[in-house]
Amino acid sequence: MRKIVFILSAMIATAVSAQGVVDVHSHIITPEFLQDLERHDALLDEGFPIPDYQLDNHLAWMDNAGVSTSVLTLAAPQPFNNQVVRLTNERCAEIRQQHPGRFKFCATLPLPDVDAAIAEAVYVLDTLKADGIKLATNVRGQYLGDPALDPLMQVLNDRKAVVIIHPHRPEPINGSVMSQTPLAMQEYLSETTRAVANMISRNVLARYPNVKIVVPHCGAYLPLAVPRMKSLHPVMKANGLVGDIDWAANLASLYYDLAGSHSPEIIKMMLTITTPDHLLYGSDFPYVKPDVLTAQLQRMKAYLAQDPELAPFERMFLADNARYLFGERQVAPQPEATADDELIVRIAEIEVYEQYLDEYLQAAASIGTTSVKTEPGVVCIFPTQLEGKHNHFRIVEIYRNQAAYQSHLATDHFKHYKESTLHMVKTLNLVDVNPLDIDAMKLIFKKK
């Protein structure tokens, strides 16, 4: 069975290479941008030198690495001159026109001036036909989630904009801390998490659901922060510190690029807060040397092909998800099919907190019924309660194959179940088992 999966994964990898990778995390650095920063003595505002950018070098790396399309965004820090913002956006539009299919761009906005940012957003989206918008985590202390940005979010929502966010230097900043641990090593992850958490706490993403947000650098600390936020939310709400939070709606708008320290383990951790159709390849060109980026991409392809849990999603991560997000596909990407006889049998061992017992009983029963009725690939989801341990559950799960299992994880009803019960679950252990008589099992669980 593993041999079949490995052979299929190799075929998928070949298809990806032929189709070309889509890179959603690359930066453009224009001469006007550098001159603006130099005039304001801001070339080292982010704690490290800004690299040289040449379009020819970018194209050469893309050709060498098998990247068909790159999404351009302006690097940090934020320009001081609004005219530089306009020139950069128009330069990106020219590059896209000069190299059809090779580049997309997410336009920069002249924040923190919200009125100017709205005017620029209308221009770039309606006239330049920008593929999306790039927003900094904060611009001179104005953080994403700030109520002052709500009118801008409404404009972006009306136009169903894709927004790529990127960390900028936090404001205020402790200079001595930054000198000891440069921003890119740690604070950028904190800054990204801070900005997204700020949006979630105000239900920004739930209130503007047409805006799709791409979170950089493997989701930063969000796989750790989201469960903590959920667990503390009832206490914070009871003390009047926060209001209601629509977790499912907020998280549904978030996509994540894989720029940085990606690995099978990191990807699986990210899948605890999102689904496979929301992960996207990113390089961080030109901040990483081209030969290093190429080696990283080849390593990613290798571990995706060799990991049975991730192999069905290789093409989705590297190309299809991004193409669908940016409107190039009419049908949402689906995981690759695997062998028909690759039956998956799993037992989920779950302990829930006592105070949520009744709610969990209802949720567990509902997910099993809905999944079996509506998903052809779900053979059985059968929750049971341990005798004498009423807050301990065992759920028998049977799927026709790996593709059916991964497809199940992407369904709206599973995502709702997962998000609504995450704070109820004290422990979770997934146990894979090998059926001794598959034919008998198929007879027992035969579906009409």
Image: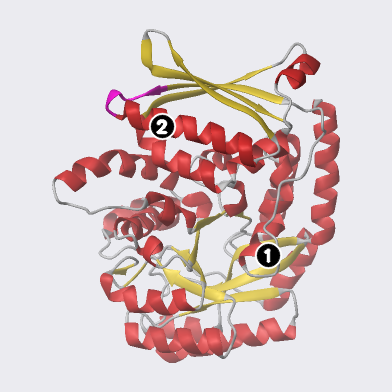
Residue with the mark numbered 2:
362
Residue 398 to residue 214: above or below: above
Q: Amino acid at mark 2?
A: Gln
Q: Residue at x 83, y 42 (%)?
A: 10
Q: Amino acid at mark 1?
A: Arg
Mark 2 element type: helix
Q: Is residue 353 magenta?
A: yes
Q: Nearer the viewer, mark 1 or mark 2?
A: 2
Residue 39 lies, in percent from the top left, at 39, 86
Q: Earlier in the sequence, mark 1 or mark 2?
A: 1
Residue 432 lies, in percent from the top left, at 63, 20
Badges 1 and 2: C-beta atoms under 8 Å apart?
A: no
Q: Residue at x 46, y 65 (%)?
A: 165
Left or right of 177, for residue 210: right
Over which residues does the magenta segment extend?
351-355
Q: Nearer the viewer, residue 135 or 236?
A: 236
Left or right of 383, for residue 339: right
Residue 413 to residue 179: above or below: above
Quadrant where the N terminus sits is top right
